[in-house]
Amino acid sequence: MDPDKSEKAEIDDPLTQGQSWKEAGRSVALATVIETWGSAPRPVGSHLVIDSYGHFEGSVSGGCVEGAVIIAALDVIKDGKAQMLDFGVADETAWSVGLACGGRIRVYVERLH
């Protein structure tokens, strides 16, 4: 059974959703935008929470960046080691990371205890 379907909170705040998931006994990671430069889709302080089932709430960027953050968060949940992720534009990677608009973001991903 998918626990997210039975416990989905009608909440817009990802931090509140993460707390709800923790209280339900789930393992949860928190991703936070800690730095931006140039054009960035989300401001510093934006959050994305991810549980061990791969459910997520919130946003740190969008597109391929969000997918990469979710994958990293699942690793953080498994091994408990926080990660600092940098996404930016280089000619050869601009489209693959979803920041072709010319920006750069730094995201810190940690397991919630």
Image (spheres, grey):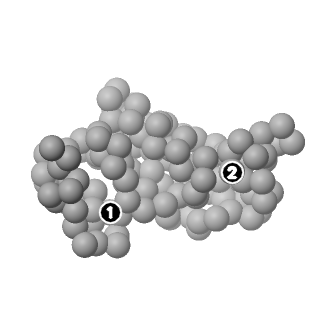
Does 42 sit above or below residue 87? Answer: below
Label number found at residue 88: none
Front one among 62 and 35? 62
| Gap in angstroms between the C-alphas marked 2 and 1 | 25 Å
Look at label 2 and name its amino acid: Gly
Residue for point 57% across, 57% down: 62
Look at label 1 and name its amino acid: Leu
Residue for point 78% across, 59% down: 101
Q: Dot 2, crowdedness within 10 Å: few (<14), some or many (≥20)?
A: many
Q: Which residue is mark 2?
A: 98
Q: Position of residue 10 (x, y in %)?
A: 25, 72
Q: How many marks?
A: 2
Question: Where, by quadrant of the figure, is residue 12 drawn?
Answer: bottom left
Q: Position of residue 45 (x, y in %)?
A: 50, 64
Residue placed farthest to the top in the image? 79
**Is 68 placed left or right of 7 in the picture?**
right
Quadrant for the C terminus in the image = top left
Q: Position of residue 16 (x, y in %)?
A: 27, 66
The kind of secondary structure element at disc 2 is: loop
Front one among 45 and 9? 9
Q: Position of residue 38 (x, y in %)?
A: 77, 62
Label number found at residue 15: 1
Q: Dot 1, crowdedness within 10 Å: few (<14), some or many (≥20)?
A: some
Residue for point 24% across, 41% down: 27
Question: Where, by quadrant of the figure, is residue 93 drawn?
Answer: top right
The kind of secondary structure element at disc 1 is: helix
